[in-house]
Image (cartoon, coloured by chain):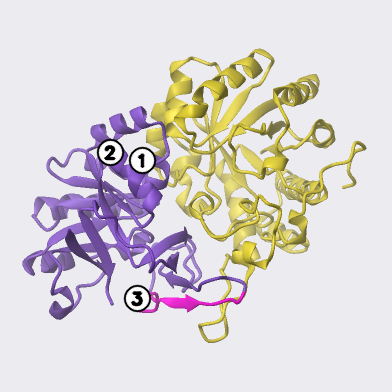
Chain colours: A yellow, B purple
């Protein structure tokens, strides 16, 4: 299982590449993607710098453009992708079927990863996106291994990428959640109301929190994804770089256990020792990028 | 404007159907809430047009939903299906005369994609209606040539595939959510949330159906 890591800067790219990232991805301001604007690079030149750093280590770089794109941005998006392709960009992460179809018509030569946001939960949906020409599927964060067999071993030869749900999870289907969220509080005014999925609600006896599966369940799921043939694990961009670096090191540790042949019991036992809250994005959501020097692990 | 009742998985008592000319059975938000064929037949025999609502689907859910829709349509129990999964469009494509509606989840994608591609896509797959509870989306769907079916009085806000009632992802469940909607309050939020099945809603009492909507779908009171 290889590591795909999101970055916000060349400094982060260097740090993650030096610690085992096989691929990087990034976003560019003005090209819509599913992260805070400040998590994006300022322009294509910054992406070229990351492509150059990755190429020196034989790693590939993707650009995330994983929102549904209005027709008015097609021209600019296509031009940017074509320019970056000429400068070594390997692939693009997309969600919008119309844009994928348009990109394929132009024979851009870019590898296309279907974003986790694309509502692809079954073989029929994968057939649809395979017809558009996607090369990789990032499984929805709420996809379970018992339902993912036909996606992991699909007949189209499409590669698959998963999240380590024990360490990174969303309680609602990511692209279909329109509750207040720090990712949409773009004015920077992030208050309690912007963390709806962390709130404790009154109403039912004993109160209510939006539930998630147990840590044991999620560790077992990651074990099954690994042995089910998932090709990549994703460590997403994060506003707080130290938090993301911490997440990366923990995922790397779990994959190392699996690479060494850990039994399910041993893997879950070791995984339970890791200090992590998969939905921990309270204070850690504060924008704190890597300084020019490499961040501490 | 046609008036439809969202009946869910079960057959409501006859008095609940009074004043409605259509029933929307099933769920846009949980694949486990598919009704039995007998429920669809009962609604049809009550003199209603029947729409089958479907959700995001796993492989098993896709097979079940496609089989139920095909069988119920061929037996005359339903004449419409609400689709929220890309994968369901293909198996339903062979059912000539069955009308398809883009559900509230699939509509998020289709209402914003490049219009010329989307119009071709909708025509190829026989999608003629759109479900929504959002005025902006309703306008975009109308501009794509779809007839808009309006849902009220609550507006969809989020969906999960992890059952909040039974705390699992399984496709077999005890239907603990039946008749057990929860009102969730927190003083940080302007308005309470409503949890119904696997979806969260907010009250949207101030938003009424646009005049040009051809149908309004209401929940069982």
Dividing the picture into quadrants, the one containing residue B29 is bottom left
Q: Quadrant of residue A150?
A: top left
State the residue in front, B132 or B34.
Answer: B132
Q: Residue at x 87, y 47 (%)?
A: A297
Give the labeled residue for mark 1: A124
Q: Is residue A297 left or right of residue A146?
A: right
- The chain ID associated with circle 3 is B
* Element at label 3: loop
Label located before the other in sequence (3 or 2): 2
Front-lying residue, B84 or A215: B84
- Element at label 2: helix
Q: Position of residue A74 (x, y in %)?
A: 50, 25
Q: Which quarter shows the N terminus of chain B?
A: bottom left
Q: Residue at x 52, y 44 (%)?
A: A117
Q: Position of residue A223 (x, y in %)?
A: 62, 52
Main secondary structure along the magenta-highlighted residues: loop
Q: Nearer the viewer, residue A251 or B188?
A: B188
* Label 3 sits on residue: B178
Residue A120, compared with residue A203, is above or below; it is: above
Q: CA distance from mark 2 to mark 1?
A: 8 Å
Instruction: Say the numbered circle drawn on residue B90.
Output: 2
Q: Find the distance from the CA under tag 3 to the CA under tag 2.
A: 31 Å
Residue at image location 25% in from the left, 42% down from the top:
B146
Residue at point 42%, 25% (across, down): A101
* Residues shaded magenta: B175-187
Q: Quadrant of residue A15?
A: top right
Asked whether residue B221 appears in the rendered view, the answer is: yes
């Amino acid at each position: 299982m290889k590591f795909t890591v999101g970055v916000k800067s060349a400094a982060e790219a260097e740090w993650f590449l030096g610690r085992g990232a096989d691929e990087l991805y990034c976003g560019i301001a003005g090209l819509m993607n599913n992260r805070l604007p400040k998590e994006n690079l300022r322009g294509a030149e910054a992406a070229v710098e990351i492509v150059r750093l990755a190429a020196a280590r034989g790693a590939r770089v993707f650009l995330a453009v994983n929102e549904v794109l209005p027709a008015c941005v097609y021209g600019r998006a296509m031009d940017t992708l074509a320019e970056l392709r000429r400068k070594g960009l390997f692939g693009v992460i997309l969600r919008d079927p119309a844009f994928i179809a348009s990109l394929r018509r132009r024979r851009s030569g870019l590898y296309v990863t279907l974003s986790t946001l694309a509502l692809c939960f079954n073989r029929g949906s994968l057939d649809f996106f395979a017809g558009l020409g996607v090369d990789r599927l990032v499984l929805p964060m709420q996809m379970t291994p018992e339902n993912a067999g036909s996606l992991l071993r699909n007949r189209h030869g499409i590669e698959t990428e998963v999240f380590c749900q024990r360490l990174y999870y969303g309680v609602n289907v990511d692209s279909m959640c329109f509750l207040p969220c720090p990712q949409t509080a773009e004015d920077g005014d992030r208050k309690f109301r912007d963390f709806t999925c962390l709130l404790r609600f009154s109403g039912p006896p004993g109160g209510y929190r939006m539930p998630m599966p147990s840590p044991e369940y999620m560790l077992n799921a990651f074990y099954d994804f690994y042995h089910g043939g998932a090709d990549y694990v994703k460590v997403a961009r994060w506003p707080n770089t130290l938090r993301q670096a911490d997440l990366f090191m923990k995922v790397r540790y779990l994959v190392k256990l699996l690479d060494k042949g850990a039994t399910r019991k041993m893997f879950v036992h070791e995984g339970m020792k890791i200090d992590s809250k998969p939905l921990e994005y309270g204070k850690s959501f504060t924008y704190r990028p890597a300084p020019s020097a490499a961040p501490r692990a | 404007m046609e008036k439809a009742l969202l009946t869910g998985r079960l057959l409501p008592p006859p008095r609940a159907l009074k004043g409605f000319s259509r029933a929307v059975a099933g769920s846009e938000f949980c694949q486990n809430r598919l009704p039995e064929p007998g429920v669809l037949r009962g609604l049809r025999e009550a003199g209603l047009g029947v729409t089958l609502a479907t959700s995001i689907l796993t492989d098993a859910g896709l097979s079940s939903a496609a089989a139920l829709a095909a069988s119920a349509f061929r037996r005359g129990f339903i004449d419409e299906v609400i689709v929220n999964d890309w994968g369901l469009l293909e198996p339903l494509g062979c059912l000539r005369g069955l009308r398809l509606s883009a559900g509230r989840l699939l509509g998020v994608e289709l209402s914003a994609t490049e219009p010329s591609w989307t119009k071709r896509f909708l025509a190829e797959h026989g999608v003629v209606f759109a479900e929504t509870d959002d005025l902006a989306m309703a306008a975009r769907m109308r501009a794509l040539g779809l007839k808009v079916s309006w849902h009220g009085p609550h507006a969809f806000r989020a969906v999960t595939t992890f059952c909040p009632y039974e705390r699992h992802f399984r496709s077999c469940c005890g239907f603990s959510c039946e008749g057990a909607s929860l009102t969730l309050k927190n003083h940080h939020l302007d308005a309470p949330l409503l949890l119904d099945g696997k979806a969260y809603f907010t009250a949207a009492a101030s938003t009424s159906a646009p005049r040009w909507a051809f149908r309004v779908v209401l929940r069982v009171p």
